[in-house]
Amino acid sequence: MSSSKQIIDQTEKYGAHNYKPKEVVFAYSDGCMVKNPEGDEFYDMLSAYSALNFGHRHPEIVQAAKDQLDNVTLSSRAFYNNILGEFCEQLCKMTGKNMVLPMNTGAEAVETAIKTARRWGSFVKKVEDGKQEIIVCSENFHGRTVTIISMSTDEVARKGYGPFTPGFKVVKYGCLEALEAAITPNTVGFLMEPVQGEAGVITPPEGFMKKAYELCKSKNVLFIADEVQTGFARTGTMFACEYEGFEPDVYIFGKALGGGIMPISAVVANDDILGVFTPGSHGSTFGGNPLACAVALKSMEILKRDDYPKQAREKGEYFKSKLKEIKNSKIVDIRGRGLLIGVEFDCNAAPYVKKLIENGVLAKETHDFTIRFAPPVVITYEQLDDACAKIKKAFEE
Ligand SMILES: *Cc1c(COP(=O)(O)O)cnc(C)c1O
């Protein structure tokens, strides 16, 4: 096998430079562990931004994929396939909603949710078509398409990509007054992340989401929860909205839904909302493909059977308490919910990430100052202890 250096050089030579990866090559992976071509082992504490909640290559999900590979992998939506219906039904049962629109990536699902809100606004709320407004939050991350970066406040993500899609208003994350002031008769949706992962693991003030949901309800505005990163147990509840005991009008899912094997995303809502789509009005060749549905179905089964939310909650508390024992005066905050934890420094965190990697722990800084720890939910307490010892070694001194 080529060396890490050869692989990195090749990737940098022929691949576009829209990322600057940490210099670790994944050549073999299993559960929480990855190995590079030289055989060095690492704990994966990023979990592909929560796409690997089940760990790498969960044996039952791999088996479900293999079985489906021997059966049927692709139908397109020109025809039915034997598993999409079951996928939709199970996702409905899990969320308490009654309709699913399957896509592939998180960004596609966000785009689909934007279309949903606009069409619902036009058809149901009777806002003049072209006047629909959607309210989003400062420091949001919803993906990379032109329309999605049109509502971003991150200049690095926007520079050079204009002209942008109109129809968005940005309010301060977690500020109820700002949200209320921004709502007009043309407002069709309010889109937020229950925990802002990319912004540095930021949670809104206690009670904000529920109040924002009630405000939206009273103004006939759809509350749209982007649970692409938080959904499916990551934050200690099946869905992060559950933490405040409410159900959003529209869920957006991605990442973990694919069991770490296939990209699959979905918008989930009731038929009074998702029913606005008619044949030909939206679609995706690969959306709802049998292979992705098979891994998603198995993933949902495991999430419930093995009570992943409880595991994330309890392991998250344990992990956080261990992190709080670390002595480093440059650490100013340790926060988060479940197994989505941010450690904020009062200085650039990149040198600490480098030390983590030298000690065998993979994590990455987000927005310079905060390191996000999000291990697979399947991590054992023994592995957490071992990883924490390595983190301590990297952070103390
Ligand atoms: C990752 C992410 C997305 C985009 O998902 P992709 O699959 O990368 O397109 C959208 N919203 C949130 C909150 C995310 O974390």
Image: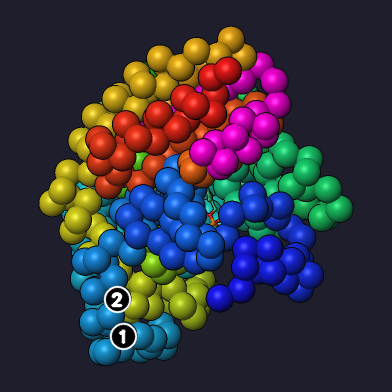
Q: Quadrant of residue 208?
A: top left
- Residue depicted at x 49% and y 80%: 285
Separation (CA) of disc 2 from disc 1: 6 Å
State the quadrant of the C terminus: top right
- Residue depicted at x 66% and y 16%: 346
Please report the bounds of the magenta region as a residue range.
338-359
Q: Quadrant of residue 1?
A: bottom right
Residue 232 visible: yes
Local crowd at mark 2 within 10 Å, few (<14), some, or many (≥20)?
A: many
Tell me residue 95's x, y (percent): 26, 49
Q: Amino acid at mark 1?
A: Leu
Viewer-nearest residue: 147 or 187: 147
- Residue depicted at x 43% and y 39%: 374
Q: Are marks 2 and 1 in contact (CB under 8 Å)?
A: yes
Secondary structure beneath dot 1 equals helix
- Residue under label 1, please give it: 69
Q: Amino acid at mark 2?
A: Ala
Residue at the far left in the pictured view: 305
- Residue under label 2, please give it: 65
Secondary structure beneath dot 2 equals helix
Q: Is residue 351 on the magenta stretch? A: yes
Residue 198 visible: no
Viewer-nearest residue: 21 or 394: 394
- Residue depicted at x 51% and y 71%: 282
